[in-house]
């Protein structure tokens, strides 16, 4: 574990976590839309190869999360890494990346990737990631004929 500047933060690999706290983290990352159904959060967590939560020992509430989604054989993606704004800059995100990469390596994954939000490239570079050829693409619901 990389460690943090806050001795009150702990990390846990979980298969469940209170839905409202996970939704709050998605909102902090600007990834939650009002039309999303929070009832899917438990399955999202269970369906992840690894789901790491950073939580404050004093309150027990989540201050960060990240997940590894994978075929559990060769490839994995780190996704949904977020830390509440008031807890950023303390090493929490770096510790979660380290935990997720370690899990992937223990699983025998040979390719671990992610899509970095604009402006976060230096953070991920410091964690050992580098740009790769190609461009991520997003399905928009239109099929060519």
Image (cartoon, helix red, strand yellow):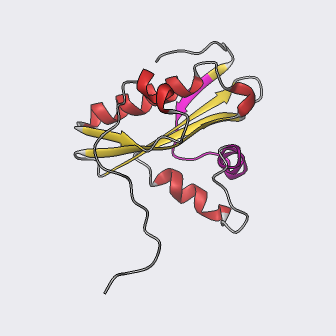
Asked if the magenta segment contains residue 15, the reply would be: yes
Q: Position of residue 11 (x, y in %)?
A: 56, 27
* Front-most of residues 6 and 13: 6
Total marks in image: 0
Residue 101 located left or right of residue 106: right
Q: Quadrant of residue 124?
A: top left
Asked if the magenta segment contains residue 13, the reply would be: yes
Residue found at x 31% / y 87%: 145
Residue that protrudes farthest toward the bottom in the picture = 145
Residue 109 shows in this picture: no
Residue 44 located left or right of residue 9: left
Residue 100 located left or right of residue 34: left
Q: Position of residue 59 (x, y in %)?
A: 77, 29
Q: Position of residue 39 (x, y in %)?
A: 64, 64
63 in relation to 91, above or below: below
Residue found at x 54% / y 31%: 12
Residue 34 shows in this picture: yes
Residue 137 located left or right of residue 107: right
Q: Quadrant of residue 25?
A: top right
Q: Position of residue 18 (x, y in %)?
A: 68, 47
Magenta-tinted stretch: 10-28
Residue found at x 37% / y 31%: 101
């Amino acid at each position: 574990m990389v460690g943090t500047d806050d001795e009150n933060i702990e990390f846990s690999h979980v298969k469940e976590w209170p839905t409202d706290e996970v939704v709050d983290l998605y909102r902090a990352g600007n990834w939650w839309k009002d039309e999303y159904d929070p009832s899917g959060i438990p399955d999202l967590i269970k369906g992840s190869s690894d789901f790491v939560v950073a939580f404050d020992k004093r309150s027990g509430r989540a201050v960060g999360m990240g997940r590894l989604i994978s075929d559990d054989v060769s490839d994995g993606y780190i996704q949904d890494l977020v830390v509440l704004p008031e807890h950023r800059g303390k090493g929490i995100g770096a510790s979660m990346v380290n935990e997720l990469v370690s899990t992937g390596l223990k699983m025998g994954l040979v390719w671990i990737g992610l899509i970095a939000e604009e402006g976060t490239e230096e953070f991920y570079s410091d964690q050992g990631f580098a740009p790769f050829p190609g461009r991520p693409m997003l399905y928009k619901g239109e099929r060519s004929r």
